[in-house]
Image: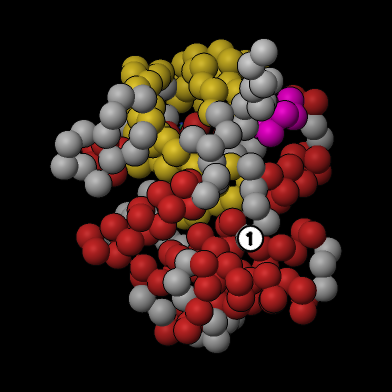
Amino acid sequence: MTPPQPPPVVELVGVRKEYPGGVAALAGVDLTIWPGELLAIAGPSGSGKSTLLHIVGSLDRPSTGTVRIAGHEVADLSDRELSALRARDLGFVFQSFHLAAGVSALDNVADGLLYSGRPLRARRREAAAVLERVGLADRMTHRPHELSGGQKQRVAIARAIIGEPALLLADEPTGALDTAAGDTVMALLRDLNAEGATIAVITHDHDIAAALPRRVRLRDGLIVSDSRAPVEAGAV
Ligand code: ADP
């Protein structure tokens, strides 16, 4: 007998999102993300990437269709339960880092465990270990303005993964970085995936999407391709 398959991390069935004025930002999306996947959600501006990110990130609800995140049916949850789901099961990384200004790297990362209710000392201990994991052991006391863009993004990634979320959602994570820093951040995401993290990268950048093992492409609110073909030669 084959072992039972773990449940999907994300399951969208027939998801539509309409905004006032009749714009269907998502026009009927089916998407399943399995544990351990590393995928790109790609597409041109206006194709529905942000809307999909908001729905997968449980920041917004669909107009119609079913959304399951980490085994929970979003329609069954109150807004308060949805916030708890977000804090516990999802990690977010943004193009512009969203670190707290004037706060050390260590405490920015420790904040990723706020919902856990653990005491500050335990959260800091954990944060130090994760900062070491992302290669910033020597930057723990630095505040965001004392860090390079690439270092800031690694702090943001550390904050997002410290609670071991079921899914890490990275929204244009290299969009504000130069090529070398962007490559470092993508290499880190690949390493974390190799260690078991499930990661979705939202990007309009063809090269970034092409280098990931699964590519979901959106156009006009629909998935127009979903490919697990081998990574293109030369794309890393
Ligand atoms: P992307 O992130 O790929 O650029 P979006 O998800 O932001 O795409 O947008 C998809 C479509 O939905 C676009 O046509 C956009 O103009 C529209 N849209 C997005 N947000 C809103 C909103 N709050 N109100 C009305 N239309 C919106």
Q: Quadrant of ligand 1?
A: top left
Query: What are the residue bounds of the magenta stretch?
Result: 68-73
Decide which of 2, 136 is in the foreground and name it: 2
Q: Is residue 20 left or right of residue 85?
A: left
Amino acid type indicated by mark 1: Ile
Decide which of 44, 140 is in the foreground and name it: 140
Note whether 41 is above or below 73 in the view shown: below
Q: Is residue 3 magenta?
A: no
Q: Is residue 84 left or right of residue 152?
A: right
Q: Residue at x 80, y 26 (%)?
A: 76
Counting from the top left corner in percent of width and height, residue 194 is at 47, 47
Counting from the top left corner in percent of width and height, residue 157 is at 51, 60
Q: Residue furthest front?
A: 1
Q: Residue at x 62, y 32 (%)?
A: 9
Q: Is residue 108 left or right of residue 209?
A: right
Q: Secondary structure at mark 1?
A: loop
Q: How is the image coloured?
A: secondary structure
Q: Quadrant of residue 158?
A: bottom right
Decide which of 164, 101 is in the foreground and name it: 164
Counting from the top left corner in percent of width and height, residue 217 is at 34, 26
Q: Residues within 10 Å of mark 1 (few under 14, many from 20)?
A: many
Q: Is residue 69 magenta?
A: yes
Residue that label 1 marks: 162
- Residue 90 can be seen, yes or no: yes
Counting from the top left corner in percent of width and height, residue 90 is at 63, 46
